[in-house]
Amino acid sequence: MAIAYIEDLARHEGQSVTIRGWLHNRRSSGRIHFLTVRDGSGFVQAVMSRNIVGDELFHRADHLAQETSILVSGTVRADTRAPGGFEIDATELQVVSESKDYPITPKEHGVDYLMDRRHLWIRSPRQQAILRVRHEVIDAIRDFFNGRGFVLADTPIFTPAACEGTTTLFPVQYFENETAFLTQSGQLYNEANAMALGRVYCFGPTFRAEKSKTRRHLTEFWMVEPEVAYATLDDIIELGEALVVSVVGRVLDTRRRELEMLERDTTKLERVKTPFPRISYDEAAEILKQHGRPFESGGDFGGTDETVLSQQFDRPVAVHRYPAAVKAFYMKPDPERPDRALCVDVLAPEGYGEIIGGGQRLDDYDLLLQRIHEHNLPQDAFEWYLDLRRYGSVPHSGFGMGVERVVAWLCGLEHIRETIPYPRMLYRLYP
Amino acid sequence: MAIAYIEDLARHEGQSVTIRGWLHNRRSSGRIHFLTVRDGSGFVQAVMSRNIVGDELFHRADHLAQETSILVSGTVRADTRAPGGFEIDATELQVVSESKDYPITPKEHGVDYLMDRRHLWIRSPRQQAILRVRHEVIDAIRDFFNGRGFVLADTPIFTPAACEGTTTLFPVQYFENETAFLTQSGQLYNEANAMALGRVYCFGPTFRAEKSKTRRHLTEFWMVEPEVAYATLDDIIELGEALVVSVVGRVLDTRRRELEMLERDTTKLERVKTPFPRISYDEAAEILKQHGRPFESGGDFGGTDETVLSQQFDRPVAVHRYPAAVKAFYMKPDPERPDRALCVDVLAPEGYGEIIGGGQRLDDYDLLLQRIHEHNLPQDAFEWYLDLRRYGSVPHSGFGMGVERVVAWLCGLEHIRETIPYPRMLYRLYP
């Protein structure tokens, strides 16, 4: 009998197949078992009738517990009422291994309880839906860049120096005599790569030793960072817009069923089209004042500020030209107003916060050196970075987009912890 | 005038375009400059004739140094002798930024000298070719798995416990009270993910604090690891074969020019077809004895042993069923010979060593617990892993494939350090 995955049942209509999976749920009447089976690719109901399989096999299925691993064989039958469009008329069932007292039952569990059992929690339909959206987001990002001539150039995780101060860095003893820091961003290396390959991106895990415990922060998260030689701030805002629209469109195209399972209001996602509204930092500050936020001009926006701003628009909003003082040392100042940086943050709608941060980089050697000193950074560690301004410096820009923030937004999640299989947070290192 | 990338010149034949890039090389006669320009997407020769551009502009190009950033405008002309098929008849040239005494000249430099300047070295045609092959290898791997119903499920970098002993792990202080270890493999988490999603893979950086200084080892390297519920050793060997054949085919299809630049003998890669020869550990040991290797049966193979073995075959060879004693605690024993593990290593041809390692996992609760104790591993840390055998255990298998080893093999490189933009090794953390 052919082995089939549940997601492929349409190809097997009318045929006899074997599904290899786990029992997700069971309802029984005296004469029929309704077994919901999952195999990782989907869920399907197997209908087992006592008349057909006989008493012995029927009774074997009487006491099957949730998450028992089973092989179910039977005929694939189309059924428009079934979520996947098909059911199986079971003719055979084989238990692979039992599952006694599976700890995650259909009843409600607390979040800590579930997080301690994250390795099992991910078997639930809701968590599977989120992880499939995550998969799609990542694939859509890569397709976007690969289709536009970008070269994936991985930047190192072990870095010798801190990019923006060491307070939120994880240090690692690197053999006997050196200390490495886990990367917070591949950007500096991306700049070197862009000088070599023109259009590049890195896509890997990044690390922040932030002690804050918020629903938007992980200590380990994945970020895609494009960098483009000869690109200006405006170029990179356009690139970011196109990326976000492309990713949202892809998820709407291919993951409707998952978004439905998550009860996501997709009409809000359908509004995500270019162009995004673009407002300056000053305009944003004005909006916050109008909404009674206790915001001091010149400072950075807090989480609640971002929420208020994002709620003014029905699509992501690009906020540009922040005060240079609150931004990193490598930002290029706006020639028309040098106390402002040529930078941009893109805030997701519905209060999901910053999903993109980037801008145009400082390409002048002397000014960069001055900034390195002003920020008390060790010049030695940045000699290679200064080289990029010594040998054929060019205007260049880039940004970073956090995968988990995007997944939380697209799935409509309260907390970022569900967007990655094994979230790492201040008090969470297990499993 | 339209801005164009060099790789897109075919679309602009006969048109006037501007290339934004860097001067790679210059030859001049009294009346003509031949300027080789690179923009990250390719290299093109711009021909600048004094008759056409006039004395002033012609002299401006007289002393342009290597890696000066320039904008070159002119008409795109097909030329079958040109490596990319096109040349540019220059009409305008603008210097963006100078490049004085660029440290990497066409003359030979030592490896340490180049590695210290890796951020500039990657601008060279050879390094660019390697990085483009790397990009393609990674993209081919992802397409392979995504096209076969696998879900990308990222496994954590911070792990609470050591998978195979702590001697080659990098510890990280995780806030006040905990120690995390940087992952050496996502496999244990992959197993949990496969129980949830059926067919999964993770693809991220992994870390080994190995003090050995060999041409095959990095402390930070990228690995793809598929894991499949209900798969046996044979299934996973087939999956590995198909993956390798698919990746090699893709690189041959799309990166011919890069392989040519690297002077790779592609006839050797064209032989990489399924099925791969499969030999048992005992057969491999016999081959080593025949070739006079001082090999002690029961032990693991060394680098030279792997080279000798791989040289017996014109394609990758799968060596299976090693002694359980030299393999990790989670390997399933061969039921027909319990002192052997149901594992496989795939060795690349031409002495490039192990590119794949994997096998069938122990799915029996009692035996796994016994192994954890035999290996003196802390049971507490593995409770979640034991859960996978408590709740619906199933046969399952997977493997890991190292990206850098594959790139080194496909590019025909002596040393693995050129396969990643910023290699990390025992004595190499900069730039």
Image: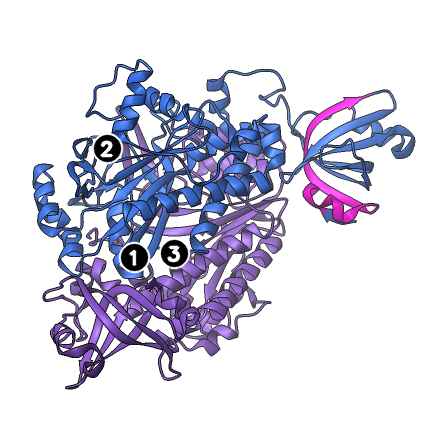
Chain colours: A blue, B purple
Crowding at mark 2 (Cα within 10 Å: few <14, some 14-19, many 20+):
many
Instruction: In the displayed orientation, state which residue is furthest to the bottom.
Output: B30
User: Could you confirm whether marks 3 and 2 are on the same chain?
Assistant: yes
Please say if A97 is above or below B76.
above
Q: Quadrant of the N terminus of chain B?
A: bottom left
Residue at mark 3 to residue at mark 1: CA–CA distance: 15 Å
Lower sequence index among marks 3 and 2: 3
The residue sitting at 55% across, 52% down in the picture is B145
Residue where numbered disc 2 is placed: A322
Give the residue type at disc 3: Phe
Q: Which mark is residue A150?
A: 3
Kindly state the secondary structure of the residue where label 2 is placed: loop
Q: In this rendering, which labeled residue sits more in front, label 1 or label 2?
A: 2
Kindly state the secondary structure of the residue where label 1 is placed: loop
Crowding at mark 1 (Cα within 10 Å: few <14, some 14-19, many 20+):
many
Residue at mark 3 to residue at mark 2: CA–CA distance: 28 Å
